[in-house]
Amino acid sequence: MPQERRDDRLQVGASGARIEFTSEDTVVKSAANGVDRLIAQAMMMKAVGKVVFPEIIFIGPHYYEMERLIPLKWTRARVAGDIIYEMCAMLPLIWGPYQRVRFGDMITDAHREYMRPRWGPHYRRMENWLDGLLDEEVTKATRIHGDPTVENVMQRRIDQRIVFIDPIPANDYIPSLIAIDMGKMLQSIFGYERILRPDTPVLNPTDTMELAGNMTSIFMHGDKLVSWYFLCVHIARLIPYQPAERQHIFWDMLTHAIEVFKP
Ligand SMILES: Nc1ncnc2c1ncn2[C@@H]1O[C@H](COP(=O)(O)OP(=O)(O)OP(=O)(O)O)[C@@H](O)[C@H]1O
Ligand SMILES: [Mg+2]
């Protein structure tokens, strides 16, 4: 198992997850807490398979070993928008068959309670928006990635193909809806990675809106409306994890997303 040490073979993620480069071809991901989640993640990646995820080599009691990947390479041919389209094309392989459901049946009190303190000054507006969506028909994925941002896309070393890492199983307050994944891609379109690393390629505002429209137009109308709401949920959930000096950037991003998307 990975030892407590700091060198370039060990990388510690935002949530305390650790990635250790164990050989030329492999890495081990482990976590001090949230072990159930880590193992659920490994099992899902193994079940869905190598077309969309790194190969899972071994699942242990509190770690798993997987194929070593390389960071996403930005080229002239592959600009920010292209990555989103590639991600859109890969997600249905994770989703599998889905069931049509009424959005209201998927929203629990736990979701409202969880979000309540996170909306800050937007609380009333967001509750109002949520209430207006409850009768929407949407498609429900039987399985979602949960966090398909550009940050969670890497490349295979052998053929440069892109794969997802770091899926998050749905829970009581985040329903297993396709719109959750679409909202996460919108979060990247809105510049999430750009805030973390200013050298990330970015879309200009016109392209951003066009892409957001195109991406969601291939899905049902209800999915589109609900994904806009979840874009705001995702941004609001990120705020408490940001360093104090960065929180205002995320509040501005949230206010902007509400202005653009709230009907
Ligand atoms: N298979 C891999 N090969 C090489 N590097 C990897 C691999 N998986 C993850 N990494 C590196 O580790 C970083 C963090 O990984 P990951 O996204 O799985 O965890 P996290 O975001 O820190 O944790 P979590 O989302 O579980 O809270 C990635 O951004 C990437 O740099
Ligand atoms: Mg991650």
Image (cartoon, rainbow, N blue to C red):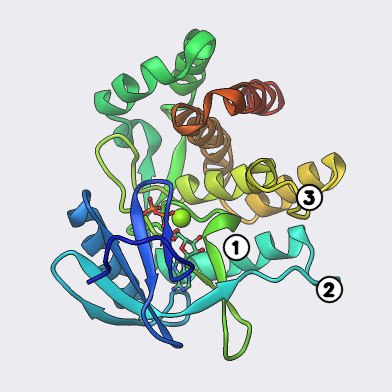
The alpha-carbon separation of the residues under discs 3 and 1 comes to: 18 Å
Residue drawn at the location 46% of the way across and 22% of the way down? 130
Disc 3: CA contacts within 10 A as few (<14), some (14-19) or many (>=20): some
Task: Say whether residue 77 is left or right of residue 176.
Answer: right
Mark carried by residue 77: 2
- Among the two numbered marks 3 and 1 on one chain, the one whose residue lies closer to the N terminus: 1
Q: Vertically, is 203 above or below 103? A: below
Query: Dot 3 corresponds to which residue?
Result: 202
Front tag of 3 and 1: 3
Q: Amino acid at mark 3?
A: Val
Q: Which residue is at the front of the view, 87 or 102?
A: 87
Quick one: which residue is furthest to the bottom in this view? 158
Q: Are marks 3 and 2 in contact (CB under 8 Å)?
A: no
Q: Amino acid at mark 2?
A: Ala
> Which quadrant of the structure image shows residue 7?
bottom left
Residue drawn at the location 21% of the way across and 49% of the way down? 33
